[in-house]
Amino acid sequence: QVQLVESGGGLVQAGGSLRLSCAASGRTFSSYVMGWFRQAPGLEREFVAAISWTGGRTLYTDSVKGRFTISRDNAKNTVYLQMNSLKPEDTAVYYCAAGNAYSRYYSSYDYWGQGTQVTVSS
């Protein structure tokens, strides 16, 4: 199995930046696709970004393209989400996920972190 621990959330003003981190460990974790999802109270969990550990390919939802960047540090077994030009609608709990398919689909991810809160004020 894979264990995931997110960090880096907090409160920022609109237009500000945050960098989220997700530390991964466990059985064969290096072979997993990593993704970020987010969920606001009362709303469905939505895809944000994904990255292939081996190939370095990235995938983003349209609403964050040009503002968010997903990256990885293989030596530290860590995936990051750099969030710039933050908007109030980015406010949500952000979850790190690991799966076997390079995908924007919730069902493609088997392991989830506990989440980290991101709040963007006007």
Image: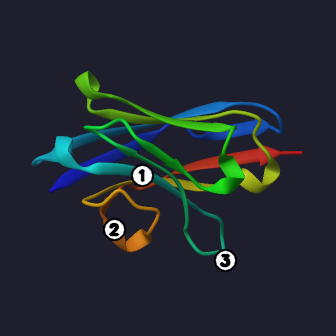
Residue at (80% x, 46% y) in the render:
87
Q: Determine which residue is flagged by label 3.
A: 42
Q: Determine which residue is flagged by label 1.
A: 35
The front one of 17 and 107 is 107
Give the mark nearest the N terminus, 3 or 2. Answer: 3
Q: Determine which residue is flagged by label 2.
A: 108
Q: Amino acid at mark 2?
A: Ser
21 relative to 97, above or below? above
Quadrant in the picture for the C terminus = top right
Q: Residue furthest left?
A: 27
Q: Is residue 9 left or right of residue 51?
A: right
Residue at (77% x, 56% y) in the render:
89
Quadrant in the picture for the N terminus = bottom left
Per the model, the C-alpha gap separating discs 3 and 2 is 22 Å
Give the mark nearest the N terminus, 1 or 2. Answer: 1
Residue at (67% x, 55% y) in the render:
62
